[in-house]
Amino acid sequence: MVLARTVNTLSEAVAARGPDLKLPVYWAGNPFQPGGGLPPSNLEGAEVFTDPEQAPPGQKLRIDYDEFGLSAWTRKSWKRFQRSIPGLINLKDGCAKKTEVELEHGRAVVYSGYRRFSGYCPPAPHDSFWAVAYLGRVVIGVNLTICSECFLRGSGGAYNSLQGMEAILRGLVLRPKPDFSAESARSVAMRRLTRTR
């Protein structure tokens, strides 16, 4: 059973599901160039999850950049993630500090915590940052720990800071919905042209 289809571009990922992907797609462009001393980050690939029972809890889409990852849920499927072990690890981390961020079309929370889950809160400065954005009927996670066995968060990078998370959140834009009817018409025309040759 196929868990997901990994492709090189977000266009291919969306096209792979066609009209069945009813989720509005938010991304950060390619490349993502927020400025403010942060380096550009290039799109590396995307995964559309086709089997809800085998995907990370409730997740519909993942978009990977070379500096960070975006995960997407509907509001309904987000509830499933919140009840899962990865959801509890990310959202109920007692050592994490929460910073509310107002966005033009929604709101977000940036979490400042620690890479290792040790059971106690160390006196050291926070070394891991992740975020959740609530945009209409979509929930976007930034650098969330997705699997139950992942007890070590990402290695960081240029965006592993409050500034980096805020830049990503403010850089999220709604990608225009593809016109699958036009695509279908082109496909039919191409098949006809191929048959006549």
Image (tube, rainbow, N blue to C red):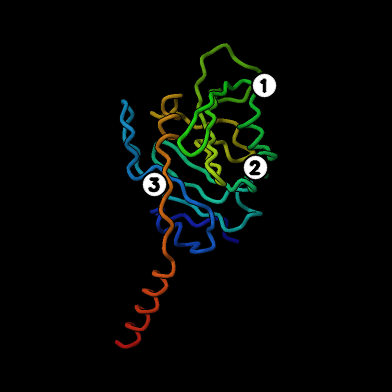
Q: Which residue is mark 3?
A: 44
Q: Amino acid at mark 1?
A: Gly
Q: Which residue is mark 1?
A: 119
Q: Amino acid at mark 2?
A: Phe
Q: Amino acid at mark 3?
A: Glu
Q: Are marks 2 and 3 in contact (CB under 8 Å)?
A: no
Q: Which residue is mark 2?
A: 81
- First of labels 2, 3 by sequence position: 3
Real-space CA distance between mark 2 and mark 3, rounded to the nearest whole angstrom: 24 Å
x 67%, y 43%: residue:
79
Rendering coords of residue 65 (x, y %): 40, 42
x 46%, y 58%: residue:
14
Rendering coords of residue 156 (x, y %): 45, 29
Real-space CA distance between mark 1 and mark 3, rounded to the nearest whole angstrom: 34 Å
x 41%, y 29%: residue:
159
Real-space CA distance between mark 2 and mark 1, rounded to the nearest whole angstrom: 22 Å
